Image (cartoon, rainbow, N blue to C red):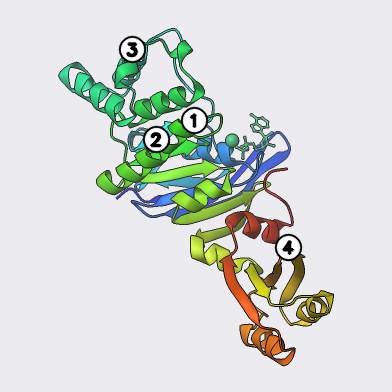
Amino acid sequence: MSKICVKNVTKRFDDKLVLDNVSFEIKAGDIFGLIGPNGAGKSTLINIMTGLLKANNGEVEIGGYSISKDPLKAKALIGLIPQELALMEPLSAYDNLEYFGAFYGLGGKLLKEKIKEALEITGLSDKKNEKVKKFSGGMKRRLNLAVAIMHEPKVLIMDEPTVGVDPQSRNYIFEFIKKINKENNTTIIYTSHYMEEVEQLCNNIFILDLGKEVASGSKATIKSMASVHGTIKLTLEDSNEEILLKLKELPGVKDCFINEDKINIFVDNLKFDLEELLGLLAKENKKIKSFNVEEASLEEVFLSLTGKKLRD
Ligand SMILES: Nc1ncnc2c1ncn2[C@@H]1O[C@H](COP(=O)(O)OP(=O)(O)O)[C@@H](O)[C@H]1O
Ligand SMILES: [Mg+2]
């Protein structure tokens, strides 16, 4: 089993507390999103989880092996795509794969097979003899992906894999993640400060800010934790300032404004009651032309939990 446990991890750089008692578990076969703004501590946490950095306190287990006490067994389960790419620029794609494959202990016929597979799955077969320094950012990411999966890791950890990547490579990376997760049951840890990506890909999510947990759990759980549940978009046959003021008075309505011909109503899911809204409109004789409830995005959830925008 390649379950992952992060227990009470704390990290200081000199006096600066960068990770503050972080704990979570990841089920085998999950696509797990680690999100937070720049500087939140994501890369530091990834580096601790993969044994590249030591925590001041706490423990990480990969598939039951402690990364500090049993590092070889734990690391054998992991493939890492670091935020700063690790490739040899003067060499060709093929030679990079050969070099890193040997590093993972692959050789001979098996190594050749694995290189071929890795090139195919990342769509780089026809570029295999080109030097990496001529590659675009997206192609380099894909090659780093190829390197990370050659030894068929049970757990693939990706640190901001789509930063500086063209849309085509981004799609490739997404499709690739879904494919190996589905076909090989590979556990994926996906780190990003792009909420839309995490929202699209991940089942379970951990939100980190300033080294601390902001929220964690399934996507649905996290969304329901936010006080902003969503936006109701309403078109009335006749809307005016007067009805806007009355809508604002309803319990659970946080804000309300007219955008083009639609009234946008932001509601707090714990206090808002749809019956009351409909009751008010009936009493005021307002006919509804269209009615739409939109779920909060993770971006809005982050805003409502931290009071900050994810990207400035
Ligand atoms: N080697 C280091 N020495 C000192 N401070 C560091 C070091 N690495 C990271 N930091 C600091 O730790 C914080 C978290 O950084 P990082 O883990 O890279 O965040 P993220 O990946 O979420 O953007 C930042 O404030 C960063 O400046
Ligand atoms: Mg980072």
Residue ID for mark 3: 95
Which is closer to the viewer, label 3 or label 2? 2
Residue at left offset 34%, top offset 47%: 63
Which callout, 3 or 4, points to the residue nearer the camera?
Answer: 4
The CA span between labels 4 and 2 is: 37 Å
**Type of amino acid at the residue the image marks with label 4:** Asn
Q: Residue at x 34, y 52 (%)?
A: 28
- What residue type is disc 2 on? Tyr
Sooner in the amino-acid sequence: mark 4 or mark 2: 2
Q: Can residue 5 be seen here?
A: no
* Furthest residue toward left: 109
Residue that carries the numbered disc 4 in the rendered image = 259
Which label's residue is closer to the chain start, 3 or 4? 3
| Place of residue 92 in the rendered image (x, y in percent of width and height, measured from the top left) | 37, 11
Q: State the residue lying farthest toward the front.
A: 237
Q: Which mark is residue 172?
A: 2
For the C terminus, give its image quadrant: top right
Q: Is mark 1 within 8 Å of ligand 2?
A: no
Q: Quadrant of residue 90?
A: top left
Location of mark 1 (residue): 82
**Which badge, 2 or 1, is on the more N-terminal residue?**
1
Q: Nearer the viewer, mark 1 or mark 3?
A: 3
Q: Residue at x 79, y 80 (%)?
A: 243
